[in-house]
Image (spheres, rainbow, N blue to C red):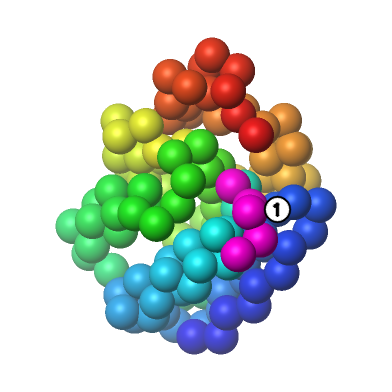
Amino acid sequence: MPAVFRVEEGILVVTLTGEMTDAENCEARRACAELCRQQDVSRMLIDLRGAVIRSSLLDTYLFVTSLAEGFPPDTLYAVLFSPETHDPDRARFSEDVAAKRGIRVKMFTREDEAGEWLRRGRGDRGTSPRARAGDVR
């Protein structure tokens, strides 16, 4: 699974391509957390449109609930996916799991909408109490 990382306008952009195993997915998450710390970034655009992720519903749940590990609590995660290769119901499930844990994840099929959501700096799903109070970098 090739992963490309770059920082643009204070947003860590992660592009994943090819078939991804759960181990590769976890390794990409660790690399993202490290880059966020190094670059002092708390907004991420994760592009999965070129990736094929084969994981169970439980694996998805465990991955989403582990997003808070190693990232600042105010991190925004905009995830781009393709309905042709990723189940939209699984995308909604990921958002719901994250929201119940105060992790601000929103799934998008359009890059412009994902970028706008990140630039606004406020999650409209899964927004933490700090963010609702306006405490978002």
**Residue drawn at point x = 62 percent, y = 47 percent:** 43
Does residue 41 show up magenta in the picture? yes
**Residue drawn at point x = 51 percent, y = 67 percent:** 34
Is 105 on the left-hand or right-hand side of 22? Answer: right
Relative to 134, residue 103 above or below = below
Give the magenta-colored segment's residue range. 38-42
In which image quadrant can residue 37 be found? Answer: bottom right
**Residue drawn at point x = 63 percent, y = 54 percent:** 40
Is 85 on the left-hand or right-hand side of 63? Answer: right
Residue 107 seen in the figure: no
Q: Position of residue 12 (x, y in %)?
A: 66, 59
- Count of labels in the image: 1
Q: Residue furthest right?
A: 9
Is 121 on the left-hand or right-hand side of 102? Answer: right
In which image quadrant can residue 29 be found? Answer: bottom left
Say which of 42 and 20 sits in front: 42
Say which residue label 1 marks.
11
Q: Position of residue 45 (x, y in %)?
A: 63, 55
**Residue drawn at point x = 23 percent, y = 56 percent:** 62
The amino acid beneath tag 1 is Ile
Is 120 on the left-hand or right-hand side of 9? Answer: left
Does residue 101 show up magenta in the picture? no
Secondary element at tag 1: strand
Q: Main secondary structure of the magenta part?
A: loop
Q: Position of residue 33 (x, y in %)?
A: 48, 62
